[in-house]
Image (cartoon, rainbow, N blue to C red):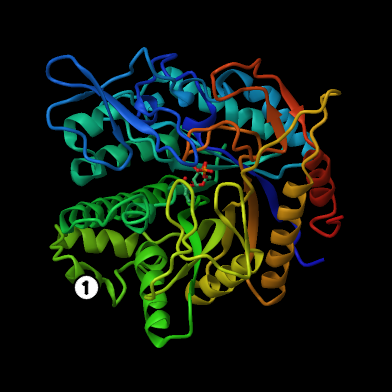
């Protein structure tokens, strides 16, 4: 009986991974619309046309050649274009969430649906209307929306014409977009997150490939600074527009462990937490950069463009709550290890005490308890686990049923871990599992890396009827919610 009354059980999605309808009703393209599918071994590619009109591709995270234009090529498949067509299925999907007993539904707003280029003064009415309909549908079913304002989907126009988030102009554009959301959906939405996994920009710099250069760090830290200021301005705007609003940060939560008890590993581990996890959370929760930030910048000769006003904004724009995703722990070590793990990105040295998913992610519920207790002690703000789940292959039986005991086991252990943290005093208010309905993987672009309680008949070759069906885990989660987390069998 550990979870408090009114605990928000639910599930989570992101616009670009589920909506589809990428060029419908005036929506403009985002980076995901020029990103191909990939796999655990093959990186997703960004496609473009060069100065001579020749098509080309670059690995995600790589620099694309000067002067090229992002483009959709006929020869490629772009899984985010269709997603799972939530744009047309939202009523059916929300009804299924309600059937499971969801109290909260986390989703995001596609920036380029509201502002197709990103720098317009006036939003696209069709976009505004779509989300209003979605929120009304949630209201009808007594489901509280939790809305991510930015989930990896800056309008492509801003990337191409302004250089994306390295440009301070984006702070203004984002603030305008956020204000529109707060104003238009006042009374329908109360819980907001400013930036999804904001810390990824720097934390993943060295995880997706080769060593990052100082130049890449300079951009990374400047992007983060601009986004942190944008987040702080949005928090202020959100409170000003509706004092009821609860606005949170969203951190990609990885629990880092020292690979050995060599003091050098212990120190490296602490520094990894600072650089990967605390860096953004500290600014968003405490309103200023951590004491270690100067050291991190100096490591890569970074001189940031920070104004006096930025510092004031950071101070006045602290969040009301801390949310995070949690999938895995990572081992860090200064020693040479041959046994590295990870699929589409490097996830450190293998931990002999853990097992790994088919995508190389360490299965570690204790790591979730550790993270919850560590972070609650640091900030003493309400915590939300807004992503957690198992990407796995599912098989549809001849009778249409889908048996996914591995997913149930995964959730059971993670819920037990949350319960322990709650009993140890952590103020946890929500649990929204990732990909409560199957959707396009952010990392690999695959459909077959499935997370849902609800199966969607959509496949990596682009085929499928989009029909929805209930997996075994659907009925299990319904029981969990019905018993407020007491019945996990
Ligand atoms: P996919 C990497 C590591 C941890 C979280 O990821 C990550 C990523 C990016 O791949 O992203 C979050 O789909 C993200 C979601 C994403 C989810 O985790 O690669 O917020 O958009 O879908 C799961 O399996």
Does residue 119 show up?
A: no
Q: Is residue 87 left or right of residue 412?
A: left
Residue sitting nearer the eye, 20 or 441: 441
Which residue is depicted at the point 82% across and 24% down?
A: 400
Total tally of numbered discs in the picture: 1
| Picture coordinates of residue 233, whole percent (x, y) | 32, 51
Q: Could you tell me which residue is drawn at 37 percent across and 77 percent down?
A: 268
Residue found 79% across the figure and 57% down from its top: 485
Q: Where residue 103 sits: x, y (%)?
A: 71, 45
Residue drawn at x 61%, y 40% as measured from the top left: 435
Task: Please state, as top left, top right, bottom left or bottom right, where the N terminus lies in the image.
Answer: bottom right
Q: Residues within 10 Å of mark 1 (few under 14, many from 20)?
A: few
Rendering quarter of residue 354: bottom right
In the rendered image, which residue does mark 1 sit on?
294
Q: Quadrant of the C terminus?
A: bottom right
**Is 418 or 192 nearer to us in this picture?**
418
SS category of the residue bearing label 1: helix
């Amino acid at each position: 009986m550990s979870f408090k009354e009114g605990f928000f059980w639910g599930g989570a999605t992101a616009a670009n991974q589920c909506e589809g309808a990428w060029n419908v009703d005036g929506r403009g393209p985002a980076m995901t619309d020029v990103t191909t599918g990939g796999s655990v071994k093959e990186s997703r590619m960004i496609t473009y046309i060069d100065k001579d009109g020749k098509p080309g591709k670059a690995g995600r995270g790589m620099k694309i050649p000067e002067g090229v234009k992002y483009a959709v090529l006929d020869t490629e498949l772009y899984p985010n274009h269709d997603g799972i067509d939530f744009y047309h299925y939202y009523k059916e999907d929300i009804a299924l969430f309600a059937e499971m007993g969801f109290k909260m539904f986390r989703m995001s707003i596609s920036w380029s649906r509201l502002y197709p280029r990103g720098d317009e003064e006036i939003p696209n009415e069709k976009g505004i209307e779509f989300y209003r309909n979605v929120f009304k549908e949630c209201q009808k079913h007594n489901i509280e929306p939790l809305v991510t304002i930015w989930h990896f989907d800056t309008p492509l126009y801003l990337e191409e014409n302004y250089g994306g988030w390295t440009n301070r102009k984006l702070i203004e554009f984002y603030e305008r977009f956020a204000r529109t959301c707060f104003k238009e959906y006042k009374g329908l939405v109360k819980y907001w997150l400013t930036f999804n996994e904001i810390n990824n920009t720097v934390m993943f710099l060295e995880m997706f490939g080769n060593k990052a250069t100082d130049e890449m760090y300079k951009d990374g830290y400047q992007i983060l600074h601009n986004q942190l200021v944008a987040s702080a301005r949005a928090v202020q705007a959100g409170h000003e527009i509706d004092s009821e609003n609860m606005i949170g940060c969203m951190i990609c939560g990885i629990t880092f462990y020292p690979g050995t008890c060599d003091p050098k590993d212990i120190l490296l581990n602490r520094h990894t937490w600072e650089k990967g996890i605390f860096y953004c959370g500290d600014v968003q929760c405490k309103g200023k950069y951590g004491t270690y930030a100067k050291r991190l910048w100096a490591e890569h000769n970074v001189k940031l463009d920070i104004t006096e006003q930025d510092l004031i904004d950071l101070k006045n724009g602290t969040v009301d709550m801390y949310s995070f995703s949690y999938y895995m722990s990572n081992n860090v070590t200064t020693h040479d290890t041959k046994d590295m793990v990870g699929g589409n990105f490097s996830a450190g040295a293998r931990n002999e005490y853990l097992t790994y998913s088919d995508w190389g992610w360490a299965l570690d519920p204790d790591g979730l308890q550790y993270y919850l207790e560590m972070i609650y002690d640091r900030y003493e703000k309400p915590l939300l686990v807004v992503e957690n789940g198992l990407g796995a292959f599912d098989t549809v039986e001849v009778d249409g049923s889908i048996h996914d005991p591995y997913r149930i086991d995964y959730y059971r252990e993670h819920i037990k871990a949350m319960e322990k943290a709650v009993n140890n005093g952590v103020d946890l208010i929500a649990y929204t599992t990732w990909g409560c309905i199957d959707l396009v993987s952010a990392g690999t672009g695959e459909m077959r890396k499935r997370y849902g309680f609800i199966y969607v008949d959509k496949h990596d070759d682009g085929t499928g009827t989009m029909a929805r069906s209930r997996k075994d885990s659907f009925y299990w989660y319904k029981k969990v919610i019905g018993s407020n987390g007491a019945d996990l069998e």
